[in-house]
């Protein structure tokens, strides 16, 4: 199905979950814990691991035994420290938004002691990693409380349109791996399109920590060419809590309940109806059904002192929409309904000597029915994923070995235009029924050196792609150089492979001969300051080379003869103060590809060399300022601008042999661009008392200036007149409230 079939619901549908209810403590300020870990003789312990029990953040001490840890939450918690050959040490700490200085002493011990830790081993050497939390997602203007829309604002990600698809450093949106507790989220978008979707599937408040890597990621991540979005879910709830949100577009709620001493249950849900949103903001589009969705999320937890922590999670989502669309010369209504389900089971255990083991098994089910014009497609998709690994934090560094993989079965059936893009069916239509099964398995090994001036990270992974009949070997190297005074240099090189997306097998009109797609990353970056410093600057340059991209031959077969390059620079700066801060992000990109995409215009002659893909955005800039006016009132504004997206101009039409008109292309493929994209967003929130807890009132405006950003172009029936296709909601006003209960 064409990306443009649901593009026009982008703004309003993305507002349908604003903002979801949070877990207790997520709105609390960040507490900074600094300290030193020593042995009984007062000597600092190098490489000790420190974390807040139940969190997903782990910090390591340096040669001076010092650490700095940042934690969100409120109330009394337990600070834990452990190191090889020492007993575990704990101390009470109050999460109150202040700064705390602590001293921790570790007693020597044998290796029989069991250490219960729920936190990942640190990966300090990896470049291009940006970490954030659910509260960051909610407070960024224009992100609309959505993880994917927030990531679009990070360095290295292009702002293509009003959709939530992630286009990373010259890569397609299908080249990003999305994980939740190591389970692969195969359909990470709501109102899904071939270039992404309208917003993310996973609610930010189902997560405790989120990180995004835009290149040079380590060997444990496979089957992805361009980026990795890694989300960590909440652990066992420590105390009862509940929240409810009443929004212009619906309602949502969450509840957390401890079960006896070591169990717990979390339940959340959202019910969205965007009709009031569209009516208030007077959408220029017609609807047969306003976008609506329902989702329910349930997780169960159990922590065993001897066996480790266990978690099971299940999510169910249903959504529908009926909206008028414009695609080339076609004007009509698209009717779409889909269901998306994700379930996984996870086990994790950390024991004495720094050993950590974890395993996750997940399954996703997806089904959709979409019709517009002569196109009528039923899609059914079922996939399994697994990951199991073991790591050890030793004096020399961290060693990790593991395996991952997945199994998929995709099925498509229905009717499509005989000519791609001809939704009106002037050239007729064809019926098809396609089923595709594939399997991918991988194994990896990594070593990362101990904290110091030079921190190397070496890794290799081996993957087997069954449908392609290929085995690949990908070495990856990272190096972190600590230059002192908060300055760091990062270097990375690696090879990456990914299976050809299943959509190409649906679109192919002839035989498919597809090898795994290949990318080579080179990354060099320089940083000044850390996440908690008043001033932080980062700069990264990258170069990527692509091979084995899908390319349609003249006979209609699909080969792996495509290739491409992408290189650019990402810059970011953050200046903070006690009551706010300002941040700026800029990216420059040049990308060229010779390949066949789902956006390739039908009937156009392809040049001999490479050309700019439809997602090549040479310049992108965002500036955000947030100000705490009072202890209870926050205001934030964000302005973003980006180069227009490429498109192929049309000079007119000519009659085809069958008697209908086909476009006469007025230039080479993607040789023109839409006007510059620009948007100003504003958020205001007020926190007040409500019973024992609080009430949050919020309001915002997306695209405050009402700019009509051109997302694409459509033409009259004879291709003599061109008209812009803009957002379904040029300016969107939204408001609501969240009640915090305990």
Image (cartoon, helix red, strand yellow):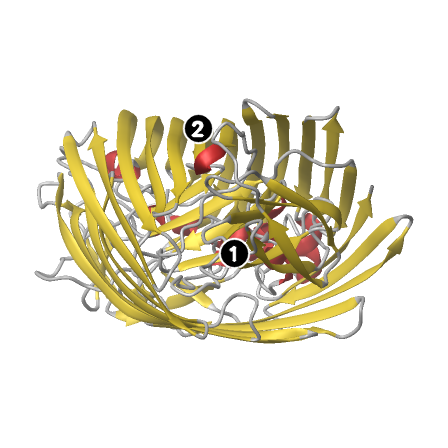
Quadrant of the image containing the C terminus: top right
Question: Which residue is at 22% across, 34% downward?
Answer: 463
Q: Which mark is residue 43?
A: 1
Q: At numbered mark 1, what does the secondary structure look like: helix, strand or loop? A: loop
User: Is the residue marked by circle 2 packed among few (<14), some (14-19), or many (20+) residues within 10 Å?
Assistant: many
> Which residue is the extreme one toward the right?
691
- Image spot of residue 714 (x, y percent): 38, 61
Q: Do we see residue 22 in this rendering?
A: no
- Image spot of residue 631 (x, y percent): 80, 69
Instruction: Specify whether 222 is left or right of 629.
Output: left
Question: Which residue is at 24% across, 53% downward?
Answer: 477
| Above or below 739: residue 237 | above
Front in this rendered view, residue 647 or 529: 529
> Where is mark 2, residue-wise?
359
Mark 1 vs 2, N-terminal side: 1
Q: Which mark is residue 66?
A: none
| Above or below 669: residue 441 | above
| Above or below 605: residue 77 | above
Front in this rendered view, residue 568 or 274: 568
Q: At numbered mark 2, what does the secondary structure look like: helix, strand or loop? A: strand
Number of numbered discs present? 2
- Image spot of residue 204 (x, y percent): 59, 47
| Above or below 225: residue 567 | below
Q: Do we see residue 237 in this rendering?
A: yes
Q: CA distance from mark 1 to mark 2?
A: 37 Å
* For discs 1 and 2, the disc positioned in front in the rendered view: 1
- Image spot of residue 165 (x, y percent): 43, 52
Q: For residue 731, what is the image quadrant? A: bottom right
Question: Which residue is at 50% across, 30% downward?
Answer: 348
Quadrant of the image containing the N terminus: top left
Q: For residue 405, what is the image quadrant? A: top left
């Amino acid at each position: 199905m064409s990306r443009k079939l649901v593009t026009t619901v982008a703004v309003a549908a993305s507002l349908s979950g604003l903002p979801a209810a949070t877990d207790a403590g997520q709105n609390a300020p960040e507490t900074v814990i600094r300290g030193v870990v020593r042995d009984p003789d007062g000597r600092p312990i190098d490489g000790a691991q420190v974390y807040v029990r139940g969190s997903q953040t782990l910090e390591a001490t340096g040669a001076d035994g010092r650490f700095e840890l940042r934690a969100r939450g409120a109330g009394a918690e337990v600070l834990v420290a452990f190191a090889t050959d020492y007993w575990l040490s704990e101390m009470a700490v109050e999460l109150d938004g202040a700064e705390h200085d602590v001293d921790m002493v570790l007693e020597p011990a044998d290796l029989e002691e069991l250490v219960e830790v729920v936190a990942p081993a640190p990966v300090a050497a990896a470049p291009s990693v940006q970490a954030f939390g659910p509260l960051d997602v909610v407070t960024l203007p224009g992100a609309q409380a959505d993880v994917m829309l927030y990531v679009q604002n990070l360095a290295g990600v292009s702002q293509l349109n009003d959709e939530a698809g992630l286009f990373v450093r010259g890569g397609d949106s299908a080249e990003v791996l999305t994980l939740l507790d190591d389970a692969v989220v195969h359909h990470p978008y709501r109102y899904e399109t071939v270039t992404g979707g309208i917003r993310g599937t996973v609610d930010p408040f189902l997560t405790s920590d989120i990180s995004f890597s835009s290149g040079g990621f380590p060997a444990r991540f496979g089957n992805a060419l361009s980026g990795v979005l890694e989300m960590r879910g909440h652990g066992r709830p420590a105390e009862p809590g509940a929240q409810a949100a009443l929004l212009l577009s619906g309602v949502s709620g969450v509840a957390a309940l401890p079960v006896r001493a070591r169990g717990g249950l979390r339940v959340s849900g959202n019910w969205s109806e965007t009709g009031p949103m569209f009516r208030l903001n007077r959408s220029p589009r017609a609807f047969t059904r306003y976008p609506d969705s329902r989702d329910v999320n349930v997780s169960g937890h159990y922590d065993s002192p001897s066996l480790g922590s266990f978690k099971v999670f299940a999510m169910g989502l249903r959504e529908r929409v009926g909206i008028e669309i414009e695609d080339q010369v076609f004007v009509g209504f698209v009717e779409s309904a889909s269901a998306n389900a994700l379930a996984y089971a996870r086990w994790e255990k950390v024991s004495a000597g720094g050993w950590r083991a974890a395993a996750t098994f997940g399954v996703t089910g997806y089904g959709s029915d979409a019709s517009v014009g002569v196109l009528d497609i039923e899609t059914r998709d079922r996939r399994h994923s697994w990951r199991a690994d073991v790591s050890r934090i030793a004096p020399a560094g961290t060693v990790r070995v593991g395996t991952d993989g997945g199994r998929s079965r995709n099925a498509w059936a229905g009717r499509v235009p005989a000519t791609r893009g001809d939704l009106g069916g002037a050239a007729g239509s064809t019926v098809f029924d396609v089923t595709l099964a594939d399997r991918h398995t991988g194994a990896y090994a990594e070593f990362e050196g101990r904290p110091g001036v030079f921190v190397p990270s070496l890794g290799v992974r081996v993957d087997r792609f069954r449908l392609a009949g290929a085995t690949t070997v990908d070495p990856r190297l990272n190096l972190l150089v600590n230059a002192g005074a908060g300055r760091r240099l990062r270097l990375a090189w690696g090879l990456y492979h990914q299976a050809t997306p299943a959509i190409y097998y649906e679109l192919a009109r002839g035989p498919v001969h597809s090898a795994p797609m290949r990318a080579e990353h080179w990354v060099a970056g320089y940083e000044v300051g850390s996440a908690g410093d008043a001033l932080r600057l980062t700069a990264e340059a990258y170069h990527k080379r692509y091979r084995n991209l899908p390319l349609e031959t003249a006979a209609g077969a699909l080969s792996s003869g495509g290739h491409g390059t992408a290189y650019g620079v990402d810059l970011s700066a953050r200046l903070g103060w006690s009551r706010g801060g300002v941040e700026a992000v800029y990216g420059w990109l040049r990308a060229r590809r010779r390949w066949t995409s789902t956006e390739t215009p039908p009937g156009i002659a392809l040049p001999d060399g490479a050309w700019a893909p439809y997602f090549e955005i040479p310049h992108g800039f965002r500036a955000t300022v947030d100000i705490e006016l009072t202890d209870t009132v926050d205001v934030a504004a964000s302005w973003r601008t980006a180069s227009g997206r490429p498109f192929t101009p049309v000079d007119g039409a000519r009659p085809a042999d069958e008697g209908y008109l086909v476009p006469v292309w007025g230039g080479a493929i993607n040789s023109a661009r839409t006007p510059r994209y620009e948007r100003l967003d504003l958020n205001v929130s007020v926190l007040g008392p409500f019973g024992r807890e609080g009430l949050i009132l919020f309001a915002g405006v997306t695209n405050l200036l009402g700019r009509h950003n051109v997302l694409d172009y459509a033409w009259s029936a004879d291709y003599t007149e061109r008209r812009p296709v803009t957002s379904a909601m040029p300016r969107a006003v939204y408001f609501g409230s969240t009640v915090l209960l305990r």
